[in-house]
Structure formats: C-alpha cells, structure tokens
Amino acid sequence: MFGGKAAYLDGKLMLYFAAKEEPWRGLLVCTSREHHPSLCGEFPELSPHPILGKWLYLPESAEHFEATGLLLVSLAKERDRRLGVSSQGKKRRIRREAF
C-alpha cells in the first residue's frame, strides 16, 4: 500500500509507516475524522494528511517524531478506540443484462 509498511491489529489497520518523499515520509495514523480533535490535542505534531485527509500524519521531520511515534505505537498496542479502521472490502459489481 503506497510503498510503505502497514500495521494491523485485530483486523484493523492502525498505523502506516511511509518512507518516500513528502507527504509520504512519516507515520500515518489510521483513524476517523471524529477522533482528529482528541488525537491532535494530545499530539500537537499531528495534522490531517494532505492527500488522505481522513488519516492523521506525523511527518518524519517533526521535532519529536520518534517520541511521538512511540507513544502512538503504544496507543495502538493498547487498542485505543480512536485508532484503527476496518477494511470495507470491495463491493461486488452487479452485472445487468440488456433485454
């Protein structure tokens, strides 16, 4: 996925580690928009990802990248309810026959 490493727990995508060029160089926090205020309040270096706005982004260039990243990994391991998105799977396309 986007050339990085995804971390899943209990079938949920929790974190995504990207090592390409900005804005794909850092840690993406897989969450829903409803949890953005809480997570950004707790971790001010987080912001909505510029392309995947539903997820939060911690750029590798952030001053406290390693410390914040470790705290986010700890939250994921604790199964913090604010983290994680379930795969919705692909919907099957219904083929309609022309009469």
Image: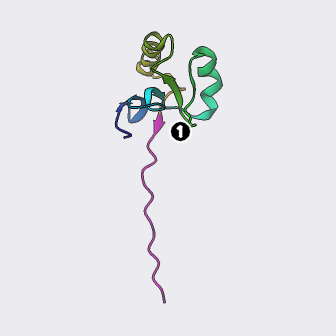
Give the x, y percent position of residue 92: 43, 62
- In the displayed structure, would residue 58 be above or below residue 90? above
User: Label 1's element?
Assistant: loop
Decide which of 21, 53 is in the foreground and name it: 21
Question: x, y (%) of residue 21?
Answer: 42, 31
For mark 1, does the 10 Å Cα neighbourhood hold few (<14), some (14 to 19), or many (20 or more) residues? few
* Image quarter in which the N terminus is found: top left
Picture quadrant where residue 50 is located: top right
Q: Which amino acid is tagged 1?
A: Leu
Residue sitting at x 35%, y 33%: 4
Above or below for 64 versus 11: above
Q: Is residue 47 left or right of residue 99?
A: right
Q: Is residue 50 left or right of residue 2?
A: right
Q: In the image, which residues are magenta?
A: 85-99
Query: Does residue 96 lie above or below 22 as drawn?
Result: below
Q: Within the magenta stretch, is there residue 93? A: yes
56 to the left or right of 78: right
Return the x and y of residue 71 as percentages of the image width and height: 46, 13
Give the total number of marks visible in the rendering. 1
Residue placed furthest toward the bottom: 99
Residue furthest to the front: 21
Residue 15 placement (x, y as % from top left):
43, 28
- Which image quarter: residue 69? top left
| Display coloring | rainbow
**Magenta: predominant secondary structure element?**
loop
Q: Residue at x 43, y 43 (%)?
A: 87
Q: Residue, x 56% and y 17% (percent of image)?
A: 45
- Say which residue label 1 marks: 52
Q: Is residue 33 magenta?
A: no
Q: Tell me which residue sits at (65%, 24%) in the image.
A: 37
